[in-house]
Amino acid sequence: MSLTSDEVNFLVYRYLLEAGFTHAAFVFGAESSITKSGINGKEVPVGALVSFIQKGFQYMELEANLNEEGTDVYGEYTPLQARDILVKDIDELKVTVREMKEAAQQEQQDFLAAGPKEIPEFAIRRLAGHSQEVICLAWCPTSNLLASASSDGTARIWDLQDTGSSGSGRVCVCRHAPQGGAAGTVELTCLEWSPDGQALATGASDNAVRLFSREGVVRSLLAGHRGMVMAVRWNKRGDLLLSGSLDGSLIVWDAKAGQQSKAYSHHGAPIVDADWRNNTMFASCSQDGSIAVCKLSDGKPLRHWQGAHSADINSLRWEPSGKLLASCSDDGTVKVWQATSDKPVHTLSGHVGSVTAVRWGQSSSGKSHLASCGDDGSVRVWDAEAGACVHVFDEHASAVTLIAWSPDATYLASGDASGRLLVWSLRSGGVVRSMQAPSTVYDLRFNKDSSLLACCTSETQPILVADLRRQA
């Protein structure tokens, strides 16, 4: 679709009239033969030319903010000056956006650097309510609502909007009654918020997936697995939910309809982890040592790396752009994959013993960082494209169980088997905050603005939420 010269001339003519340039409009209309164009002026809205130009500017600005694949905006959306859009082509605008993001990141003060290293007691909230150990946590992506999943048969949604309060605020209890009136307690295994923060998905020992509202009301009970649900993952758009089970199956659910959309059974052993690449493609790993990449439009895996690792796979995650996939294993390696290749792009060695988790972080400039942790007590940060280790953090005295990036990848938190939590600054390479939990760290998560760090442990203890900004 394109505008004809007559249509462009009419838009200019109308703009001159609307702006009060009556004489110029008369001369331009006569020279361009506007009256012979056949365009009905009553059908053209007021301000049409300005509206077209503004929309064009917005399109150029959006395109300049897209990642390399053109699939999503990377980092914080960066507005551009009209003058830049007028005089630069799209490649030059992309460079301008990247430079602005990098400059903003450099200017950002490290708000943790000036505070005390050990988090003071008054800055730690204790959220009590679960009667058994808490397995995992998840912050709502749009607000300070913290969800927790426990072996006591409940998920809880804690309202921590008032970060200055010492209490837990409003709590919604999401109860999981056994299906069909069966006896016993349903143990929760996993949970995740939808991208818009309006729905919470949980997986449990009764083989079911449940969807709750943020008020704790059950929206759907999704039954289809024949074994305990080990992973629930929303796609980026939030319309599909992926679940993986001990029965070796993966099911894609239509979240709005509350119905099964597609099922997969290509793994020959229990599912360990899964992650969406985008809205229509995901990866999964199994205790059979294989990794598979599936596309919803295909009936079989796009890639199925049999023997991807020589021992159990513990975790896998896509890079935010979807270009690379990272996996880690008890074989002591981290591997980086591409969906277009039959073999790993890199095999990253350095850990001694099992590698327990891999996580990607993305800075405000759009640069991705890959982190891993292991039984050797170390945390490593890798340049995944080059296949090189760029940081080794080794201040833990016991096995590191989990790691978590802050949303802007400025900080990396790690927790170990002794309950020690450390927050590292990627910029300085040192510890900027630390905290002692009562036992092995099961999960830890930053909230959306990196001001709060939540963790749960292996014993029936309150959830700890540290306010990283409070110093006095």
Image (cartoon, rainbow, N blue to C red):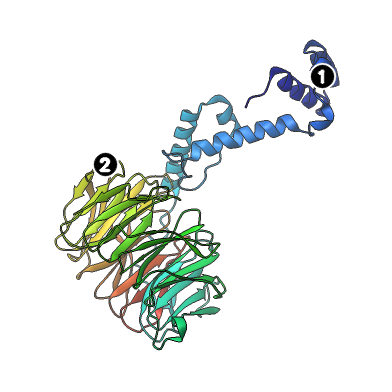
- From the viewer's perspective, is residue 366 above or below residue 44? below
Q: Nearer the viewer, mark 2 or mark 1?
A: 2
Marked residue nearer the N-terminal end (2 or 1): 1
* Residue placed under numbered mark 1 in the picture: 25
Task: Spot the residue most to the top.
Answer: 31
Q: Amino acid at mark 2?
A: Ser
Residue 393 picture quarter: bottom left
Q: Is residue 405 visible?
A: yes
Task: Spot the residue most to the bottom.
Answer: 183
Residue 215 picture quarter: bottom right
Rendering coords of residue 76 (x, y %)? 49, 48
Rendering coords of residue 201 (x, y %)? 46, 68
Tell me: 156 left or right of 204.
right
Cβ–Cβ under 8 Å for marks 2 and 1: no
Residue drawn where x is 24% and y is 57% of the image: 328
Residue 460 vs residue 119, the one in the foreground: 460
Residue drawn where x is 42% and y is 39% of the image: 69
- How many labels, in total? 2
Rendering coords of residue 207 (x, y %)? 38, 74
Q: Could you tell me which quadrant the C terminus lies in?
A: bottom left
Rendering coords of residue 155 (x, y %)? 45, 77
Label 2 residue SS? loop
Residue drawn where x is 58% and y is 27% of the image: 86
Residue drawn where x is 29% and y is 55% of the image: 371
Residue 56 vs residue 180, the one in the foreground: 180
Q: Amino acid at mark 1?
A: Ala
- From the viewer's perspective, is residue 351 above or below residue 155? above
* Residue placed under numbered mark 2 in the picture: 341
- From the viewer's perspective, is residue 38 above or below residue 72? above
Q: Could you tell me which quadrant the N terminus lies in?
A: top right
